[in-house]
Image (spheres, rainbow, N blue to C red):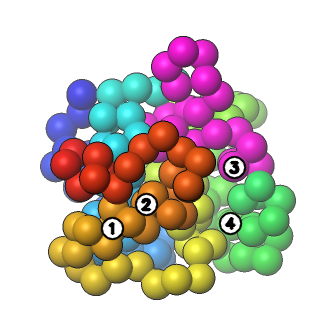
Amino acid sequence: MLDILQFRTNIVRPVLLALGAHSTQAEDLLVGTAVQESNLCYLRQLNEGPARGLFQMEPNTHDDIWTNYFAYQGNFRERVEAFLVPGQDRHDQLAWNLAYATAMCRAHYRRVREKLPDPGDIDGLARYWKQYYNTAQGAGTAAEFKDK
């Protein structure tokens, strides 16, 4: 398992700042998402599932962001693109390119129209994650997010 503080300060925060999409709430939400989704440990979904990376993003979600969100987000798309390693599969990069995976997680949440919960609102972050990342169909719960 990665150290949470190092993950926050060496990956999440610098990526969010480079994207121009940093806030305390965004940082907390992304760290919480990675802890909930992968326990900061798993780079591929267990049991041969499709999700990849610490944020456990599925290829279909990844592709939807590129097709239906980035088409209208020129500057933001370019900032995310800057984290890609040329010539490498984008889906695979969700597993091994921590900066790119972080940028894609932020892009996923940035599509949501509802503002992020207030800083320090763990219950709000847990509900936000459940509604907009895990969804009603997902097996995770807001209570799990909060506990982790």
The residue labelled by disc 1 is: 125
Q: How many marks?
A: 4
Q: How far apart are marks 4 and 1 (CA)?
A: 27 Å
Q: Is residue 116 above or below residue 56?
A: below
Q: Is residue 142 visible?
A: yes
Considering only order in the chain, which callout, 3 or 2, is on the residue closer to the N terminus? Answer: 3
Q: Nearer the viewer, mark 3 or mark 4?
A: 3
Q: Is residue 129 left or right of residue 101?
A: left
- Mark 3 Cα-neighbour bin, 10 Å: few <14, some 14–19, many ≥20: some
Q: Label 1 is placed on what type of residue?
A: Leu
Q: Is residue 75 above or below residue 32?
A: below
The location of residue 33, given as percent across then percent down, is 38, 51
The residue labelled by disc 2 is: 129
Q: Nearer the viewer, mark 1 or mark 3?
A: 1
Q: Distance between the residues labelled 2 and 4?
A: 25 Å
* Residue at 38%, 49% in the rendered image: 141
Q: Label 4 is placed on what type of residue?
A: Glu
* Residue at 46%, 84% in the rendered image: 115
The residue labelled by disc 4 is: 78
Identify the mark at residue 61; answer none if there is no mark.
3
Considering only order in the chain, which callout, 1 or 4, is on the residue closer to the N terminus? Answer: 4
Q: Label 2 is placed on what type of residue?
A: Trp
Considering only order in the chain, which callout, 4 or 3, is on the residue closer to the N terminus? Answer: 3
